[in-house]
Structures are given as structure tokens and as C-alpha cells.
Image (spheres, rainbow, N blue to C red):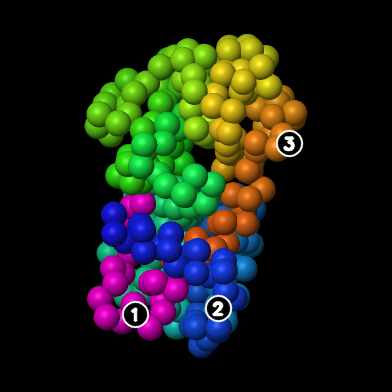
Amino acid sequence: MDEAWAILRQARRFQQQAPERRLSGRRLLLLFYEPSTRTRTSFEVAARRLGAETVSVTAQSSSIEKGESLLDTVYTLQAMAVDGIVIRHAASGAPHLVARNVHSTVINAGDGMHEHPTQALLDGYTLWRHFGRLEGLEIAIVGDILHSRVARSNLLLLTQLGARVRLCGPRTLLPPALAEAYGPRVRATYRLEDALDAVDAVMVLRLQMERMQAGFFPNEAEYAREYGLTPERLRLASPQALVMHPGPMIRGVEISAEVADSPQSVIREQVENGVLIRMAVLDRLLGQTAAQGAPAMMAKG
Ligand code: NCD
């Protein structure tokens, strides 16, 4: 976890002081096979702030649509001398496959239901900025845990940095084995009131409809009634509790508009922190120090 702390501290340095163009002359490929607003633009802004050049390829505007295989696409693009590849893909493990087959640094920007390391880092950074620590914090993660790479990466990162996590969602979206896999700092509950009781932060997750083949919950109204974060429910949390959401959020279903826009909500700040975290990650993997043996790949938080 020293590496995670190094990234969080570097993000804080970047926040305090605008960095010089440390990545000038570097070229970053943004390869997005799934829709993304925040993650793609924040990698782009982060790269440019550090002076790097970016090339953006999305599934809708390239030969990916014509059925070119992932590796063929990557080989073609690598021939354009890219130093790093940021990849988002619907298949879990896709960034690992690419990393095994190219020389460039590969950064996972979300792979299927597996991992989303920079999201967890920016969430951890947001918590650290507000509380000055992660050790001992109680965090509730609420919603579609089953399909969530955000939940999985946060479980890894937050527990290793000393926080405790309560997972909460309907039985169909919260497999008990998932909570057990992350050790004694994690517990699962199906009751929202129990999950929220005196917590320091609530992370609300989006219902990942695109990954649901069957009826995982009766309908949106029913889901909102059981698991939607309303002002009354938020009062169960600690008075200073933060409200977080990785976005995109479905207002009125997972979270009420009132909670999303309340003073306790740090949802927009998460987006700002996302740029700082991605700057820190790019700097670490593509900057001067990268040559001295920093890992060529970031697949885990
Ligand atoms: C998340 C993602 O794509 O995994 N969003 C994001 O990166 N900002 C969460 C989601 O799509 O629900």
C-alpha cells in the first residue's frame, strides 16, 4: 500500500502547486470500448496538464466497430509510438491481456465487473482530504455491488488503508461470498438502516443495467423505496458524513436530488480529485521515475 500512499501524496502536491510540464514529449493513448464521460476526460485533462499529448480512440469511431480484435487494434495503435495506454473495456481482464502483449505502460480505466483502480484512488483521496485519515473510518457502499468494479477496487484499497466497509444492497446484487473475500474489515447487510448507522461516508453506486441480463430487482420504484438514499435516511449516518457517487447517477432511484445536491455531497469534488489522482498516476508511470522500475502496469488499487 506504499504505492497507494505515494499516489495520494503526489495528488496532494499537485493540488497545492501547479506542476511543470513533466510529461512533455510523452504520448498517451486513450482507448475506450465502453462509454465514459468523467474517466476519459479526466485522464485527458490530467495528461495535458502535465504536458503530454493524447490520442483518443472510442469504440464508435474506429475499426473497433468493424470487429477488429482488441490486440490487433492495440498493435496498430502502438505503431504510433505511444508511451502509455489507458484502457476501458467491458471484458474483465482486458487490460491484463493488453499489458502482456505490448511494451507500453497500460492503465486500467475500468474493466467489466473487475477493477477500476483510479476511481478507488480518487475516492480514497476525497476521504483523506476530508478526514485527514482513512484508518478507522466506517464507509457504507450501497447498491449494485455485484456488477461494480468501483466497489471491488474500493474494497481492496480502503480496507488496506485501514477503513472498514459495510456493503449493502438487495440479496440479488450482493453475494455474501464477495464480502467474505475481502477479510474481516468488510461486512454485508441487506438493511440500509443498518449500513448507514453512524457511518463516516456513504458511497452510492449506479444500477449497472447494461450488465444485467435478468430481473435483479422488481422495478426502479421498488428499488428506490428500499435502497434509495433520502435525506431522512442520511440522518442515520454521522452528522459529518460525506455522500459520494462515482457517477453517472440516476437521481430519484439510487439517490434523491436533495441528497445529491446537499452540503454533505462531495460528488463534484470527486470529479476534481479524479484529475489530480490521474495526474499522479500518469506522473508515476510515465514520468522520470518510471524508468527506474515503477511497475509497468496498474491493474489493482
Ligand atoms: C463508474 C464506471 O464506469 O465504472 N463510473 C465512472 O468511472 N465514473 C461507475 C458506473 O458506471 O456506474
Q: Locate residue 30 relative to residue 69 in the image: left or right.
A: right
In depth, the one of 152 and 101 nearer the eye is 152
Q: CA distance from mark 3 to mark 2?
A: 31 Å
Q: Position of residue 297 (x, y in %)?
A: 33, 64
Mark positioned earlier in the residue sequence (1 or 2): 2
**Which label was assigned to residue 218?**
none
Task: Determine whether 282 is above or below 90 in the image.
Answer: below
Look at mark 1 in the image and give the residue it sits on.
289
Q: Secondary structure at mark 2?
A: loop
Task: Determine whether 175 is above or below 264 in the image.
Answer: above
Q: Secondary structure at mark 1?
A: helix
Mark positioned earlier in the residue sequence (1 or 3): 3
Mark positioned earlier in the residue sequence (3 or 2): 2
In depth, the one of 54 and 127 nearer the eye is 127
Q: Position of residue 119 (x, y in %)?
A: 49, 50
Boundaries of the magenta span = 282-301
Look at mark 3 in the image and give the residue it sits on.
261
**Which label was assigned to residue 19?**
2
- Residue type, mark 1 in image: Thr
Residue 243: image quadrant is top right
- Do tag 1 and tag 3 residues touch (Cβ < 8 Å)? no
Name the residue at the bottom extreme.
25
Identify the residue shown where x is 54% and y is 63%.
276
Q: Please name which of the two marks, 1 or 2, marks the residue nearer to the observer.
A: 2
- Residue type, mark 3 in image: Asp
Q: Position of residue 263 (x, y in %)?
A: 70, 37
